Image (cartoon, rainbow, N blue to C red):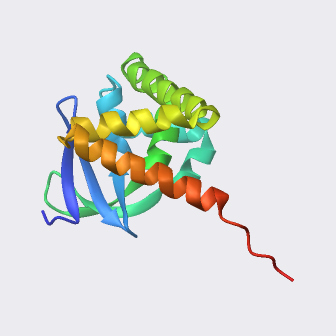
Amino acid sequence: MGKDKALVVFQDKKIRRVWHNSKWWFSVVDVVEALTDSPSPRQYWGVLKGREPQLLTFCLQLKLPSSDGKYYSTDCANTKSMFRIIQSIPSPRAEPFKLWLAQVGYERVEEIQNPELAQERMKQLYEQKGYSKEWIEKTSCFAIMLSVILFLAPMPIIK
């Protein structure tokens, strides 16, 4: 499987994905299988599509390898669309993921109201990635100075 097609693993379930139009697209059926206890995830997805037909507007049919080694057209969704689909899955196994999505959304709203929170979160992310505190401070100070300069710069007058 090339680097434009790869498997990811979520809760010990393999999820097929393909790189298409500069984005990763994931097999909806594979995600449904990972987030439900359904013995037939394809049928589960069919029922979900019947109940909420607008979910199909988020999907593309892309060819993915099957267990028999052949490629078949499969409903796929990019990351943003997959988040929306997951919100529609009424399964206890999907609840922790939904709670995480709600928490992330809440944090982003807080960061819009208080940009210092976003800056602090970014510092923590860089630290988790292994960047030194000195590098983080130097870089964040530069970013703050640049934003202040851009904010204080006179706006061009358009005639």
Residue at 17% x, 64% y is 3
Residue at the limit of the structure toward the bottom, as seen here: 159
Residue 106 horizontal/vertical position (percent): 56, 27
Q: Quadrant of residue 112?
A: top right
Residue 134 horizontal/vertical position (percent): 24, 42
Q: Quadrant of residue 158?
A: bottom right
Q: Is residue 123 above or below residue 153?
A: above
Q: Is residue 155 above or below residue 148?
A: below
Residue 26 horizontal/vertical position (percent): 34, 51
Q: Is residue 61 above or below residue 114?
A: below
**Image quarter of the N terminus:** bottom left
Residue at the limit of the structure toward the top, as seen here: 92
| Tally of marks | 0
From the viewer's perspective, is 5 left or right of 76? left
**Image quarter of the C terminus:** bottom right
Q: Quadrant of residue 150?
A: bottom right
Q: Nearer the viewer, residue 26 or 79?
A: 79
Residue at 42% x, 61% y is 61
Confirm whether residue 155 shows in the render.
Answer: yes
Confirm whether residue 88 shows in the render.
Answer: no
Q: Is residue 84 above or below residue 146?
A: above
Q: Nearer the viewer, residue 31 or 149?
A: 149
Residue 99 horizontal/vertical position (percent): 46, 21
From the viewer's perspective, is 17 left or right of 46? left
Q: Nearer the viewer, residue 21 or 117?
A: 117
Residue at 52% x, 34% y is 116
Residue at the limit of the structure toward the right, as seen here: 159
Q: Nearer the viewer, residue 92 or 117?
A: 117
From the viewer's perspective, is 19 left or right of 21? left
